[in-house]
């Protein structure tokens, strides 16, 4: 899936129909957003690098930092990142910790200690296990990779604050929901929990994020 053209999931139309049938609330959200869908641009390194850049900052701020990062490393490959001096990476708006994370990610790709060519054939938990060995990549970031890069259909990121907020708003009259409760609640959306998650995000922010 390497390349510049956005890729859309083959299962999207079927998932929409299935979710709308089993969940009237979700069906209403899906109908309210008829012309948007999850897309992946397919480059594993860039997807993970963007996820690191976006940690703990707003989407707008992350887009700004990413633009400056691309300006100092236009190829945006592991080799390109490793050639850029640390102070120039920091000058693009990365914290010192994120500089270390981006460089560690690049070193893993360049050194072959992670295996993106194998990921399409691996199950979700195996991919997560490999990714969390990289500094700065926790389970949430790995789950975002599964959704936005590998386009896995059945990921439920129970620690995602946006998903929790949307479920609280639409299903619990604003009452908070914890990770365990959300995991049980989301079983009704299987095998399309990624799609349910994506539309619940849209209910809070209609502009899709693309990694």
Image (tube, helix red, strand yellow):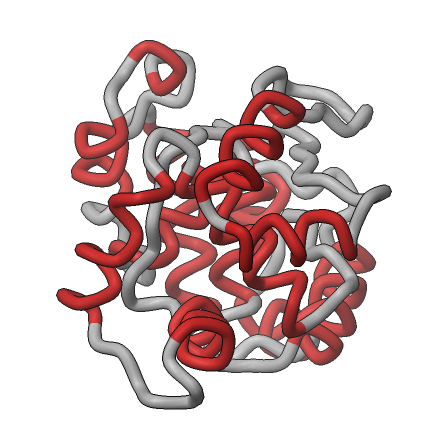
Q: Is residue 109 left or right of residue 128?
A: right
Q: State whether residue 97 appears in this view.
A: no
Q: Is the residue 185 above or below the residue 94 in the image? A: above
Viewer-closest of 161 and 178: 178
Viewer-closest of 179 and 170: 170
Residue 204 percent across, percent down from the top left: 64, 73
- Determine the residue positioned at 62% across, 56% down: 84
Q: State whether residue 48 appears in this view.
A: yes
Pick the quarter of the image with the N terminus: top right
The image quadrant that residue 9 belongs to is top right
The image quadrant that residue 50 belongs to is bottom right
Q: Number of callouts in the render?
A: 0
Q: Is the residue 133 above or below the residue 28 in the image? A: above
Residue 106 percent across, percent down from the top left: 45, 43
Q: Is the residue 131 above or below the residue 191 in the image? A: below
- Determine the residue positioned at 66% across, 39% down: 38
- Determine the residue positioned at 66% across, 33% down: 40
Viewer-closest of 110 and 170: 170
Viewer-closest of 104 and 211: 211
Residue 177 percent across, percent down from the top left: 27, 78
- Determine the residue positioned at 31% across, 44% down: 188
Q: Is residue 129 left or right of residue 27?
A: left
Q: Is residue 195 left or right of residue 205?
A: left
Residue 164 percent across, percent down from the top left: 38, 73
């Amino acid at each position: 899936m390497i390349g510049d053209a956005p890729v859309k999931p083959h299962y999207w139309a079927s998932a929409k129909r299935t979710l709308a049938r089993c969940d009237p609330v979700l069906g209403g959200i899906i109908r309210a957003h008829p012309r948007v869908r999850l897309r992946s641009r397919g480059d594993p390194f860039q997807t993970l690098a963007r996820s690191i850049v976006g940690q703990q900052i707003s989407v707008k701020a992350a887009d700004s930092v990413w633009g400056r990062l691309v300006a100092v490393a236009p190829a945006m490959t592991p080799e390109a990142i490793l050639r850029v001096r640390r102070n120039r990476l920091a000058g693009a708006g990365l914290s010192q910790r994120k500089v270390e994370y981006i460089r560690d990610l690049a070193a893993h790709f360049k050194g072959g200690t992670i295996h993106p060519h194998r990921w399409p054939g691996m199950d979700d938990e195996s991919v997560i296990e490999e990714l969390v060995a990289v500094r700065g990549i926790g389970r949430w970031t790995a789950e975002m990779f599964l959704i936005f890069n590998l386009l896995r259909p059945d990921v439920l990121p129970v620690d995602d604050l946006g998903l929790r907020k949307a479920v609280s708003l639409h299903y619990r009259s604003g009452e908070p929901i914890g990770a365990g409760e959300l995991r049980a609640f989301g079983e009704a959306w299987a095998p399309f929990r990624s799609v349910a998650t994506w539309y619940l995000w849209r209910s809070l922010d209609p502009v899709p994020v693309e990694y």
